[in-house]
Structure formats: C-alpha cells, structure tokens
Image: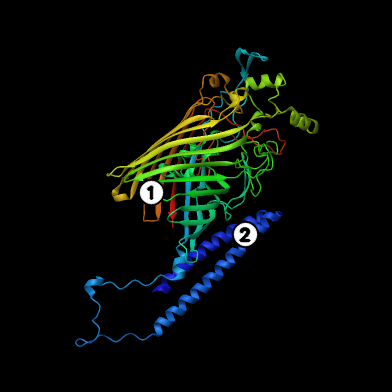
C-alpha cells in the first residue's frame, strides 16, 4: 500500500534530518563564540523545522486521500451478458494491477540523494631522511659562479613518517534537489542544497598542522548548492557554490572516485600538495549548461573575485576562506591570502558523446593569483642572491615592519616576494571509449601555466604538463570491476625551494617529475552498496612532492613530516616538506549511494 511506502520514505528522511541536525549542533558547539556561525546554525534549524512541517502536511494529505478512497464503494461487477460496459481485458493489461498515481510526498522524497563512503587505510610517506644539504653559489653574489653543495643539515624527518593506519571518510554527502514549474511557462525553477559529511570524525574547522581553513565541514552548503532556471530549448543556468566545468568535464575519466590514487593527485594539481587548484569548488559562481545537439554540448562559468584589494590578499566578500582554499595565516604564514588567493575566474568546456565514445576539451583561468608567501623560508641559492643584493623583487617593507615588532621571529624567516602575482590558467583535452566486452579506456592531456616575468621564473613550480591513462574492466555480469591508472607530472621551470632537502642541482637539471600508479577492485553487493580494495603509489623525483589522496579522499598522505609549532610567529616554520618522497598506501572500504 502507499501508506507503507510513505512510512519507509518518512523514516529515511527523518534519518537524514537527524544526520544533518546532529552535525549542525556539533558545529554550533565548537563555534559558539562566532556570531556568524550562530546565524548560520539558526537558519539551518529554521530550514529543518520548515521541512518537518511540510512532511506533516503531506502525510496528512496522503492519509485523507486514502481514507476517502477506502470509503468509496466498489463498482458493481459487469454482467456476463447484456448491454453493460465490457470488463477490462486482462490480456491488454498483462494481468498486472494498474500503477497507483504518485503522491506529492513520494515525489518530494525522490529529491534526496547522497553517498556514504568510509575506508580503512594504511599509508606511509616514504621520506628519504639522508638527503638534506645546504646549497649556495661559489660566490653568493654571482649566480654564474656555479653551485656548491655544503654540509648535511644534520637532522632527519620529525615524527611518524612510516605506516600509519587510519579511518577515512571519502566524499560522503547528503543533499536534496528539486524543481518548480513557473506558472504556465516552459521554464523550471531548480534548486539543490548539499552538505559534505565526515563519517569518521566530528564536524568542525579544518585546522591541522599543515593547513588552516575557516570552512566548517559537515554543514549545509559544503557541497554543490545552487538555484537556477532550466528550459529544454536553451539549457540551464545555475548560481551558487559548485565545481566548474573544467573539473566536471573529465570526472568520468577518473574511475577511482575519492580513492587514494584518484587522478587529482597530479591532474589539476599545480603545487604538488593537497590542494587541487584546477579542481576546486568555487564560491559565488554562475554556470551555464547548454542543451545537447546531436551529441554536442558545452558549459561556461564565471566566478567573480569579490575582493576589495588589487592583489587579492583578503578573503573575498561573502566567503569564509581565501579563494586559494585556506585561511589567512595558514601554514604559519603572514595574515594574508598570499598563498594562492586569486580574483575573477572563468572557463568552460565542450563535449561530444555518441555511442561508446566521449570526447571533451576544457579551459579555466584564475586571474592575479597571489603567491608572495613563496619567498618565506626559501632554500634557493638564487633567492639568497636576491636577498643579499636587496632586490626590489622582495618585500623588505613588510619584512622590516615585522622585524621591528618581532625581532626574534624575523631572524628565523626571510622576506616574502613583492610582485609574485600572475594569471594562472590551464587547458586539457581527453576522451573515453567503452568497448562492447566491458573495457573502458580513459586518456587525458593537460597543460597548466603561470604568466610570470622572466625574473621570477626560477621559482615557478606551477607551470607543467600532465597526462592520465586508465583502464577499467567489468567482470561477472557487472558485479566486479578492476581498474588501473597512471598519472605523470612533467617538469616545471622552477621551484620556490621550500623543501627541507631542496636540491639546487636537481632543479637545474629539471629533476622534479612524478608518477602515480593506482589499482582498484570494486565488488557490487547490490545496486546501491559497493565494497572496494584500493592501492596507490606516488613516486616523486628530485624536488617533487605530490601526494596520494588529493582531490577527494578524506585523509591525504603527503611529503610533510610531523614538525609543528606551539605558537604562531608568521615565519612559515612548521610543517617541513621533503622532496622526492615515495608515498604508498592501501585502502578498503564501503560505498553506499542513494
């Protein structure tokens, strides 16, 4: 009966409400002093209360309809002979009872969606602790005098850098989407609200020894959240916070989802750390999705920078974090958004799909990306030359003001850059082909650029090419899938030299490439539940420091050791990066989708 289905749907919704409200309450407790967070939690609670009222009304309406139907007397049976209407033919209906009409409540419940993914991981950083040496020029005031390697720095990695078991929540989320037909028009108003859940830990601010963020995980809006309009003739327009077309156009080429070795370890990742610069979710973004014409479609996006400064050193208006996905001062840096903050962003893609073939090309631009903090703590001999010659490329004004206030801390660091602000953009093209016997082949080429003047190219680690190749074979009538992937990061023109074991000679020879290898087996238990076993191995050469887990896996394993500070002094002293690490990890978990 319909009421039985309603009870099951209602139970599912109440469970979803409990998850959301539970995370909201925990987030409120952690940030009770923050008035802004209180306002958010109040609005969230009002939404949940309104949702409960709607459910009560729908349930009451459904019960009234069923009571009315039960009170209506059944129609008399048709006579065997005579002029009465003929009985319905069983042959025409196939002997099946006519489907009951969908109620408003049932339609409402269909809007919920989500993914629960939790894994058991065991990973190691693979750091070489014997390779940290001092480097300089034979004549520090003459870069043409040749490189000289000094003595060993005398200490290895701090903390646990071997295998560490962990429980990780990976891309878990709950959301609701729906639409509303506008009057008698052929235009629909569409909406979606989503939250990213941490299934393995309590929600809160993302403040670790390697990164600080003001965004509360496990809160409404930490997922693709938008409103918009949709029409079959002219397409869809969405406004909110969501991923851009550059990322979404090639998501299907990544069979590993939120696994340890998903392709975001290298693809879209300019710096080689945990952030995926060309795969980020944008605040305040507008996206247009075109209709499909004979297999061809396109998408375009614009994300206004909303920054009150010319050099994007402040948090954008209406946002919680810098546009570079961290908070000012993250990494024990100065209280600026100068570790990747950018202004306007725009881009798009074009796609073609017919039969088993899918092809796409995409482009994305980030304007005026501020990376002045790359000068803090640099181990580069050329940076030392700039420092000794009082180069105008360095921000001595900020450094001297800092030294006057904190002379002890200033002695442990170096000036930031003054003009390390430039456009960063990327383009890529790739495709997928599905063969009749269950084999899927994915291939992708990408090139990322940073438009720096020649004087700053020596520290440009953001410009390089990358490639991705993956195979995915379905077995056992679709219940089992095995997949293998390989990503390669090409050499970069330079390096900021923040690694403790930075090797100037290897950088001169271009030895900073990386390769990442992934294997995965997935077993489908039913239509919604999957068990998987995953392994990933990233091999960094020379000064490279790419990780495993970037771009979706809850816990990342990177090239940072356990160095941490007990107070903030803005010197960048803290998490020590080691180039050339070889991270290896194994993961097994369950994914449930609804």
Residue at label 1? Answer: 293
Residue closer to the observer: 150 or 176: 176
* Neighbour tally class for label 1: few under 14, some 14-19, many 20 plus, Cα within 10 Å: few
Q: Position of residue 50 (x, y in %)?
A: 58, 67
Residue at label 2? Answer: 25
Residue found at the far left of this picture: 81
Quarter of the figure that contains the C terminus: bottom left
Q: Earlier in the sequence, mark 2 or mark 1?
A: 2
Count of labels in the image: 2
Q: Position of residue 476 (x, y in %)?
A: 29, 48
In the displayed structure, 49 sits above or below 249; it is below
* Quadrant housing residue 568: top right
**Which tag is nearer the camera, tag 2 or tag 1?**
1
In the visual, does 17 lie left or right of 338? left
* Residue drawn at the location 47% of the way across and 41% of the way down: 260
In the displayed structure, 155 sits above or below 206; it is above
Q: Which mark is residue 516?
A: none
Which element is circle 2 on?
helix
* Residue drawn at the location 56% of the way across and 59% of the way down: 20
Q: Residue 136: tell me if it is visible.
A: yes
Q: CA distance from mark 2 to mark 1?
A: 47 Å
Q: Residue 121: tell me if it is visible.
A: no
Residue closer to the observer: 246 or 396: 246
In the visual, does 361 lie left or right of 502? left
In the visual, does 229 lie left or right of 87? right
Quarter of the figure that contains the N terminus: bottom left
* Neighbour tally class for label 2: few under 14, some 14-19, many 20 plus, Cα within 10 Å: some
Q: Position of residue 529 (x, y in %)?
A: 40, 54
Which element is circle 1 on?
loop
Q: Position of residue 187 (x, y in %)?
A: 47, 60
């Amino acid at each position: 009966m319909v009421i039985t289905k309603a009870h099951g749907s209602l139970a599912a919704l109440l469970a979803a409400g409990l998850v959301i409200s539970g995370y909201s309450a925990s987030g409120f407790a952690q940030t009770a002093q923050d008035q802004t967070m209180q306002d958010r939690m109040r609005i969230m609670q009002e939404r949940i209360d309104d949702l409960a009222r709607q459910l009560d009304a729908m349930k009451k309406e459904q019960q009234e309809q069923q009571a009315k139907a039960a009170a209506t007397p059944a129609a008399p049976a048709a006579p065997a002979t005579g002029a009465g209407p003929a009985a319905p033919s069983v042959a025409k209906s196939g002997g099946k009872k006519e489907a009951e009409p969908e109620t408003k409540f049932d339609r409402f419940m269909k809007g919920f969606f989500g993914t629960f993914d939790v894994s058991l991981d065991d990973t190691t950083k693979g750091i070489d602790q014997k390779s940290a040496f001092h480097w300089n020029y034979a004549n520090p005031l003459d870069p043409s005098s040749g490189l000289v390697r000094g003595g060993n720095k005398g200490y290895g990695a701090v903390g646990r850098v071997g295998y560490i078991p962990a429980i990780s929540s990976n891309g878990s989320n709950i959301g609701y989407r729906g639409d509303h037909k506008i009057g008698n028009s052929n235009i629909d108003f569409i909406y979606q609200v989503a939250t990213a859940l941490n299934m393995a830990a309590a929600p809160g601010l993302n403040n670790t020894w390697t990164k600080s963020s003001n965004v509360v995980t496990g809160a409404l809006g930490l997922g693709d959240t938008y409103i918009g309009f949709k029409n079959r003739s002219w397409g869809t327009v969405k406004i909110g916070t969501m991923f851009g077309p550059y990322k979404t156009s090639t998501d299907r080429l990544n069979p590993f989802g939120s696994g340890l070795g998903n392709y975001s370890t290298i693809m879209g990742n300019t710096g080689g750390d945990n952030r995926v610069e060309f795969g980020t979710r944008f605040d305040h973004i507008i996206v247009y999705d075109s209709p499909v014409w004979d297999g061809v479609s396109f998408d375009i996006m614009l994300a206004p920078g909303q920054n009150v400064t010319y050099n994007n050193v402040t948090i954008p208006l209406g946002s919680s974090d810098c546009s570079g996905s961290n908070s000012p001062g993250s990494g024990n840096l100065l209280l600026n958004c100068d570790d990747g903050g950018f202004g306007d962003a725009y881009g798009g893609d074009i796609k073609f799909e017919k039969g088993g073939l899918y092809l796409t090309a995409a482009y994305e631009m980030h304007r005026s990306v501020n990376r002045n903090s790359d000068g803090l703590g640099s181990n580069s001999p050329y940076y030392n030359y700039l420092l000794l010659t009082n180069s105008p490329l360095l921000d001595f004004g900020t450094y001297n003001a800092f030294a006057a206030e904190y002379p002890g801390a200033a002695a442990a660091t170096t000036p930031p850059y003054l003009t390390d602000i430039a456009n960063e953009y990327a383009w890529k093209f790739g495709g997928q082909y599905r063969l009749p016997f269950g084999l899927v082949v994915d291939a992708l080429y990408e090139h990322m650029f940073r438009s720096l003047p020649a004087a700053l190219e020596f520290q440009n680690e953001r410009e390089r090419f990358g490639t991705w190749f993956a195979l995915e074979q379905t077995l056992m009538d679709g219940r089992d899938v095995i997949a293998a992937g390989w990503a390669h990061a090409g050499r970069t023109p330079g390096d900021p030299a923040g690694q403790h074991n930075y090797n100037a000679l290897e950088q001169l020879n271009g030895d900073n490439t990386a390769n990442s290898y992934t294997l995965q087996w997935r077993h489908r238990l039913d239509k919604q539940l999957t068990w998987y076993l995953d392994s990933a191995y990233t091999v960094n050469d020379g000064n490279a420091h790419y990780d495993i887990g970037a771009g979706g896996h809850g816990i990342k394993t990177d090239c940072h050791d356990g160095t941490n500070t007990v107070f903030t002094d803005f010197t960048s002293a803290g998490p020590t990066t080691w180039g050339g690490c070889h991270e290896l990890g194994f993961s097994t978990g369950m994914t449930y989708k609804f």
